[in-house]
Amino acid sequence: MGEVLSLRVEDISTWDNLINITPRDRNENGAYIKLRKERTIDVSKELMALYTDYLVHEYGEDLEHDYIFINLKESYFGKPLKYQSVLDLIRNMNSVLQGFWAVILWIFFSVRIKYYKRNRILYVGGTTMNLKSERIYLRPLEESDAKIFLNNTKDEEIRYMTGTKGSFTLDQIQQHIRSSNEDSSRYDFAICLNENGQMIGELSISDIDEDNSKAGFRISMNAIELTGKGFGTEAIQLVLKFVFEGLKLNRLQLEVFSHNKRGIRAYEKSGFNQEGILRDSLYYNGKFSDEIIMSILQKEYKKTEI
């Protein structure tokens, strides 16, 4: 329990899904790490998402310390959580939780949490990253988005632009969202309007290869009427910030079909460069289309930021 109560914001690396256990000589709440050894704990992406939600929705903004677990009772709000407070909480539960991980999971999951609907703020190393632009924001995909996905798969124009030939059921799409959220090698986001929270598209950063510092990227709007209005370009800029400043990768790659002229222009405008062509890669509606490989490197992204 001492490891949990002594955690500070700087000990959590959200982008890497890591908790860094750091022994300290003195803690305001009396927490003490018996082994006195530094170590790193891998956690799931879902658990880390709950942690960031906790910081945004429950954590005080004007605290005089950076302890992660604080007391939420009015008379003690903002004070670092102490051993006795945790013991009292556990004692009042219907079933007794035992062990270090039972305690940390209970603390995370007991907080009243919802995904951000208006703002998307992510934490890394004690700093924040706001995945929000002038008109849109990004949030993690949820199973409730499956119906919107299903409608998109039936839109003939979108199917043509993305080269989609198969058909899908609602259950298949829900399972896809669940498995994607459990996959540590990818991040999937909904693109939403700031004004009303409406989901207007979705995107994925996939096949994250940390050894080679690269990942893949795809984006799709919900309807053709939403293209050509700059929403996609705004979303791409947020993704580049996420990939190069948050994940700190070196390369982001995408593939786009040659008949998607509007998409190609948007990618070029965002700094992507054409690398190669897979000739006649897609046969759709009686015609062949090339598949164009495009990418952007971190050094190129930095130039666009100047």
Image (spheres, helix red, strand yellow):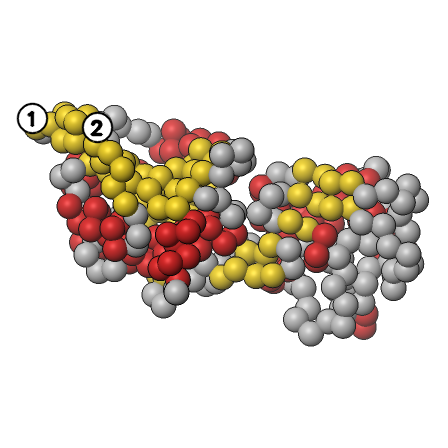
Residue that carries the numbered disc 1 in the rendered image: 286
Q: Is residue 147 above or below residue 288?
A: below
138 or 114: nearer the eye?
138
- Secondary structure beneath dot 2 equals strand
286 or 146: nearer the eye?
286
Instruction: Choose top left, top right, bottom left or bottom right for residue 278.
Output: top left
**Rendered-image quadrant of the C terminus:** bottom left
Number of numbered tags placed on the structure image: 2
* Residue 295 drawn at (x, y percent): 33, 42
* Residue 174 drawn at (x, y percent): 42, 35
Q: Are marks 2 and 1 in contact (CB under 8 Å)?
A: no
Taking the image as drawn, is residue 113 in sight? no
Residue that carries the numbered disc 2 in the rendered image: 278
Task: Name the kind of residue labelled 1 in the image.
Answer: Gly
Tell me if 55 is positioned left or right of 172 in this view: right
Mark nearer the N terminus (2 vs 1): 2
User: Between tags 2 and 1, which lies in front?
Assistant: 2
Tell me if 72 is positioned left or right of 296 in this view: right
* Residue 113 drawn at (x, y percent): 60, 54
- Secondary structure beneath dot 1 equals loop
Give the residue drawn at x 21%, y 46%.
264
* Residue 31 drawn at (x, y percent): 89, 54
Instruction: Choose top left, top right, bottom left or bottom right for residue 75.
Output: bottom right
Task: Name the kind of residue labelled 2 in the image.
Answer: Leu
Taking the image as drawn, is residue 67 in sight? yes
Give the residue drawn at x 36%, y 68%.
134
